[in-house]
Amino acid sequence: MPHRYFILNKPYDMLSQFKGVPSMRMLGDLGIDFPEGTHPIGRLDNISEGLLILTTNKKVTRLLFQGPKTHARTYLVRVIREVSEDTLQQIRSGISIRIKGNVDYTTAPCEASIVVPPENLFAAGYSFREDLPHTWLRLSLTEGKFRQIRKMMKVIRHPVQRLIRVSIENLSLGDLRPGEIREVNEKDFFSQLNIEYSPDYQD
């Protein structure tokens, strides 16, 4: 049977999994009738939002995140206080963070810019004091250590208030509202992720 591919706008305060933590909201609580064997790829933590891939194809994780070719993941990030050009350059060049095993790790160079949040940005389900200084950033990374962006921003004293993944390569969130999904046909899915399609990807 052909595999199926979906993108979801994962809401705030929801785990990127279908079962395992009864006390928290999970993907099954969306009430969407996914086909059997559907699982998330490239998870977001529960307080992050945005683009989450779901598919019945178990090979996608290896092709997208474990192969030699890197794939850019782009985020809109709201942080506390105004970010200077010097700090932007620090983000672009790499920041030392602590990762699993209590190891110091310098993040890979990435793209970073200050942006105006898009007009169609949906409410997060929680509010901020808009009168306090803050900055919206657009960050594009080719790696994804656990809570990497949050750790990077904490090190440079601009803690994250909101984090939204808007695209992976050319596969974008578009106008999906939180909790909505869009199905993508197989060839478009691989093309937009810049993965060369092969029939061998079928189980």
Image: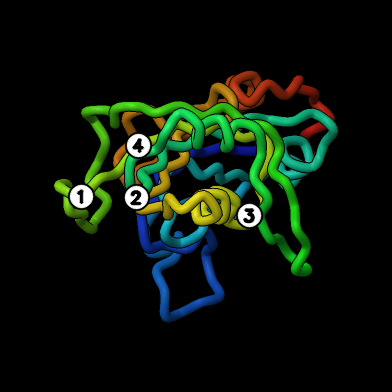
Residue 7 coordinates in the image, percent (x, y) = 48, 38
Which residue carries the number 3 mark?
A: 37
The first of marks 2 and 4 along the sequence is 2
Determine if residue 2 is in view. Answer: no
Residue 105 coordinates in the image, percent (x, y) = 75, 52
Q: Residues within 10 Å of mark 2 (few under 14, many from 20)?
A: some
**Residue type highlighted by circle 3:** Gly
Tag on residue 136? 4
| Contact between labelled residues 1 and 3, with CB atoms less than 8 Å apart | no
Which residue carries the number 2 mark?
A: 80
Taking the image as shown, residue 196 lies to the left or right of residue 48, namely: right
The first of marks 3 and 1 along the sequence is 3
Q: Nearer the viewer, residue 169 or 117?
A: 117
**Residue type highlighted by circle 1:** Leu
Separation of disc 2 and disc 4 at Cα? Answer: 9 Å
Q: Quadrant of the C terminus?
A: top right
Name the residue: 56% across, 55% down.
Answer: 151
Separation of disc 4 and disc 1 at Cα? Answer: 13 Å
Q: Nearer the viewer, mark 3 or mark 2?
A: 2
Tag on residue 132? 1
Q: Residues within 10 Å of mark 4 (few under 14, many from 20)?
A: many
Residue 68 coordinates in the image, percent (x, y) = 85, 32
| Contact between labelled residues 4 and 3, with CB atoms less than 8 Å apart | no
